[in-house]
Image (cartoon, rainbow, N blue to C red):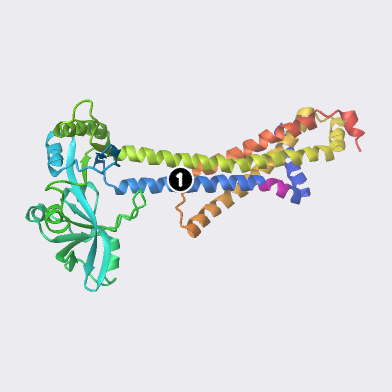
Amino acid sequence: MGAFTLMTVVTAFRILRRNRLRAGLTMLGIIIGVGAVIAMVSIGEGAKAVVRAQIASMGTNVISIAPGATTVSGVRGGQGGAVTLTVADAQDLEMKVPVLKETAWEIRDVMQIVNGNRNWLAPLYGIPPAYLTIGGWSFTSGGPMTQADLDSGARVALLGQTVVENLFDPDEEPVGSTIRIKNVPFKVIGELAPKGQSMKGDDQDDVVYIPFTTAERKVLGTQFLGSVRRLYASTDQPEDLPDAVEAIREVLRARHRLQPDQPDDFTIKNQVDIGSVSEGASQTLTLMLFAVASVSLLVGGIGIMNILLVSVTERTREIGVRMAVGAKRRQILIQFLIESIMLSLVGGLFGIFFGIIGAQATSAIAGWPTIISPDSVFLAFVFSLAVGLFFGLYPANKAARLNPIEALRYE
């Protein structure tokens, strides 16, 4: 049996070599299909990696609490339209929810930042020191603001990389220099390490941080002292996030004196939920790309079946001769199946090569991140072999069922 199989494989190769152009065109569908599957899945995996990096850039085990919606004269506004959160809320949460590691808050506006004769319009945030820890910020030079800066309303600032690039020359050291915000001088005490884009597409490095008390009293102003745009909290373990969210909801509802039938006047989101939604969207994208690319493999399989049917017709007399000298139907069947699988095998190998090249070219030309997964390469290759086997069954079965006498008389 082993000798027969080896001889059958050798014969299959000879037949394919004898019709190189036809074999090449037949394999083209498999090559395109396998290459497309690998390239598309690589793009999808790259997108998932970007999502994970963006989630990580938000900080570790972060909970975000935004003000609720507004309703004025029967018209309901969007989330964040009401001023329902305060510094006291955050401080109370830290005392009453033991699972919370830290809490922080922010107020924000877009302001003109001036350094000498250069200026830049950037988001300005008023924050406490814990905000930087929760957000996972690090520094390329200088250091963070302190509790003393917050208590005294110090005029100090931390600058993101985008702001630094637009306000300072490349060889100029920002730390120690003085910038002006709303004609108020601020000393730069830290340069933040770059984070890149957020999940919404915002530039996380286009920021200026100053102490909350300074922003509230000297720069941004406020509707009433202690009101904030958003609260943040963090936990030690991601497993603690669901319990923390429920505890936060109970404390805030009690503080805001909400009745049981009243909806929350705040919205809580945690990092795990955001990550799950984004990962789910990326997974759906990857599966969709895989499904689209798999169509090419099916088209390639149909091409193999058509060519083998033509081959059966052309080789009818040859099949009759082989049956007349003792070849069994099973051997004829295996012969054509091996030819089909060889087409898929060679096409799959070329497809892997072109798929990897295509993914790398896409990354280099379009700037899209791609991750070539060994699993996707293996899956695409096995799928191509399965396609060859499936679409080769009908022509092989047709060849094996030929009547030897009629096959010998075929012209």
> Where does label 1 land, which residue?
45
Q: Quadrant of residue 343?
A: top right
Decide: is 191 above or below 106. Answer: below
Nearer to the camera, 343 or 112: 112
Which x, y percent locates residue 88?
Answer: 12, 41
Number of labels in the image equals: 1
What is the quadrant of the C terminus in the image? top right
Residue 359 appears left or right of 229: right
Q: Quadrant of residue 252?
A: top left
Which x, y percent locates residue 305?
Answer: 72, 38
Q: Residue at x 42, y 45 (%)?
A: 48
Nearer to the camera, 370 or 388: 370
24 inside magenta stretch: yes
18 inside magenta stretch: no
Residue 311 appears left or right of 143: right
Which x, y percent locates residue 86?
Answer: 15, 43
Any part of residue 269 in sight: yes
Q: Please, what secondary structure does the residue beneath circle 1 have?
A: helix
What is the quadrant of the N terminus in the image? top right
Q: Residue at x 18, y 37 (%)?
A: 100
Extreme front residue here?
73
Any part of residue 372 in sight: no
Residue 290 appears left or right of 199: right
Q: Residue at x 46, y 49 (%)?
A: 371
Q: Which residues are magenta?
A: 23-28
Which x, y percent locates residue 55?
Answer: 33, 45
Decide: is 269 above or below 35. Answer: above
The three-letter amino acid code for the residue at tag 1 is Glu
